[in-house]
Image (cartoon, grey):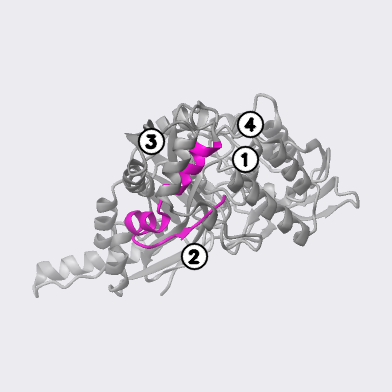
């Protein structure tokens, strides 16, 4: 950014240096992120920060999410579906190479999908591949995927970051040295600081405008604000300090970009652990929370209250917030019915994001008002993934589920909140067997109602996308149809 300098030779030199720096900056961009990914392999990790760096930038799948949430071709340029809905025949892009120079063809698709669905797969979303019966390379540019039963979400599933195509030669080292087919190649990773990508000169598709992209990790909201104001960061797509947005809005150097995400934020409850295995206790927790006060206090008014695990902008959404409305008297009565009139003590394990840390303080105060004493335990991201997500070693937690249309997680018995319901599983089976959009929306509404009736979690709010960018930087996503910072269409306005 240009600055005013006093007249003189030294000032002129400084001005020339500043101008040169600004010019150099316009060939690349530095993007702020609050969380550093634990690794860079989207097929072997659950953290959203992985996809935020590599989705569509380094790795590509058969299909992908566009900025508006639609499913569009990626490595699969077109496809056909058999009349019975079981066989998908994909025609692949040709003359594609991985960043290490190896050729991409149908065998890589067979390897990637077979690996993801294998019994020993470390893929965090193995459920995406459960319906695949076989994968066959018909020829180098054609792949046939046969399902065991129809799945109306299959093309949607193939757009997830967990379904990107990797090469057998490099799959084992993607966690630290990712090798994909995307428009940017991995350059380096300075642990604790940043990941840098450079434009791939051998990319098979349209070349991106940017030559370099550096993802800079800044956990502290105050430091994030300072970095944006100083021009050290060109954009912060998910800015962690919403209280500062009004200052950016008043500054013509910046553009504030407010959109929506797929992030259903919940107070996660361990359904398998007493006393939370009693629906009355879970319902009491839900009624103890004033969602609007939470949004105002933790997000400075940004965010939309939700009453089930579903995004308000989706056409199948139904508003169930009244079913778990703020009613502390009802909460206390439910606890008494459950034999807990003397109150209970619980742990509230919080991951690093500011919505969780700030929200946790507010929720703990609200729970205290109805007789639930919550001890806050602050965890780093790796600790949260191990203790809460993997081992279900928790009472309560707060987290945003940023994967798109992921209500099917409630059909997994071993998912971290340990909900088990044959009725909900039957709804999901019906959904998988249905392709008509209107019929699917009706089924999705029943699914929302089922988990709201069971008070599986206390549903809090839809996480907003509050972004800040240099006003000259264009092409950043307004909304987040998936957890990604897609840099393929980003450019500097001259």
Q: Are marks 3 and 2 in contact (CB under 8 Å)?
A: no
- Kindly tell me whether residue 113 is visible in this rendering: yes
In primary-sequence order, the first of circles 3 and 4 is: 3
User: Which residue is labeled 4 in the image?
Assistant: 413
Q: CA distance from mark 4 to mark 1?
A: 8 Å
Q: CA distance from mark 3 to mark 2?
A: 32 Å
Mark 2–mark 1 Cα distance, whole angstroms, equals 29 Å
- Residue at position x 24%, y 70% in the image: 2
Q: Is residue 487 above or below residue 122?
A: below
- As rendered, which of 374 and 175 lies closer to the eye? 374
In terms of secondary structure, where does tag 2 sit?
Answer: loop
For the record, the magenta segment spans 279-308
Residue 74 visible within the image: no
Give 407 or 352, whichever is nearer the viewer: 407
Residue 219 falls left or right of residue 17: right
Residue receiving disc 2: 478
The image shows residue 255 at horizontal and vertical percentages of 37, 70
Q: Is residue 282 magenta?
A: yes
Upstream in sequence: badge 4 or badge 2:
4
Question: Looking at the figure, which quarter contains the N terminus?
Answer: bottom left
- Give x and y (percent) for residue 276: 50, 32
Q: Nearer the viewer, mark 3 or mark 2?
A: 3
Residue 168: quarter of image: top right
- Secondary structure beneath dot 3 equals strand
Q: From the image, tell me which residue sits under label 3.
A: 348
Q: Percent from the top left, x then y, of residue 87?
A: 85, 46
On residue 410, which mark appears? 1
Q: Residues within 10 Å of mark 3 (few under 14, many from 20)?
A: many
């Amino acid at each position: 950014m240009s600055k005013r300098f006093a007249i003189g030779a030294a000032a002129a030199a400084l001005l020339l240096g500043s101008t040169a720096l600004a010019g150099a900056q316009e060939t690349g961009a530095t993007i702020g992120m609050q969380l550093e990914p634990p690794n860079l392999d989207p097929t072997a990790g659950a953290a959203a920060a992985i996809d935020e760096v590599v989705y569509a930038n380094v790795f590509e799948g058969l299909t992908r999410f566009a900025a508006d949430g639609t499913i569009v071709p990626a490595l699969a340029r077109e496809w056909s579906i058999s009349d019975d809905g079981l066989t998908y025949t994909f025609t692949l892009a040709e003359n594609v190479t991985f960043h290490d120079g190896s050729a991409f063809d149908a065998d890589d698709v067979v390897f990637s999908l077979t690996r993801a669905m294998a019994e020993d797969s470390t893929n965090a979303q193995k459920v995406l591949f459960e319906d695949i019966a076989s994968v066959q390379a018909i020829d180098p540019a054609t792949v046939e995927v046969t399902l065991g039963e129809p799945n109306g979400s299959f093309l949607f599933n193939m757009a997830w970051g967990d379904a990107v195509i990797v090469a057998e030669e490099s799959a084992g080292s993607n966690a630290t040295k990712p090798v994909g087919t995307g428009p940017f190649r991995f350059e380096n990773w300075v642990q604790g600081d940043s990941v840098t990508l450079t434009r791939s000169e051998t990319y098979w598709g349209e070349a991106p405008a940017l030559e370099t992209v550096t993802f800079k990790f800044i956990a502290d909201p105050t430091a994030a604000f300072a970095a944006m104001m100083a021009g050290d960061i060109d954009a912060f797509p998910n800015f962690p300090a919403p209280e500062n947005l009004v200052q950016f809005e008043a500054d013509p150097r910046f553009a504030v970009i407010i959109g929506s995400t797929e992030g259903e934020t919940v107070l996660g409850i361990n359904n398998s652990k007493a006393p939370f295995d009693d629906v009355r206790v879970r319902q009491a927790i839900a009624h103890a929370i004033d969602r609007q006060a939470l949004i105002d206090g933790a997000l400075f008014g940004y965010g939309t209250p939700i009453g089930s695990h579903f995004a308000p902008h989706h056409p199948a959404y139904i508003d169930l917030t009244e079913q778990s409305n703020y009613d502390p008297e009802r909460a206390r009565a439910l606890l008494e019915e459950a034999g807990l009139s003397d109150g209970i003590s619980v742990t509230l394990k919080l991951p690093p994001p500011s919505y969780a840390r700030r929200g946790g303080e507010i929720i703990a105060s609200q729970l205290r008002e109805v007789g639930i004493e919550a001890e806050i335990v602050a965890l780093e991201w790796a600790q949260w993934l191990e203790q809460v997500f993997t081992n279900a070693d928790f009472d309560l937690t707060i987290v945003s589920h940023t994967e798109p249309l992921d209500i099917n997680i409630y059909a997994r018995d071993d998912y971290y909140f340990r909900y088990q319901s044959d009725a909900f599983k039957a709804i999901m089976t019906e959904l998988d067997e249905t392709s008509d959009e209107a019929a699917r929306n009706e089924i999705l509404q029943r699914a929302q109602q089922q988990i709201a009736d069971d008070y599986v979690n206390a549903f809090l709010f839809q996480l907003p996308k509050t972004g800040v960018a240099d006003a000259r930087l264009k092409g950043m996503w307004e909304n987040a149809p998936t957890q990604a910072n897609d840099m393929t269409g980003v450019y500097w306005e001259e």
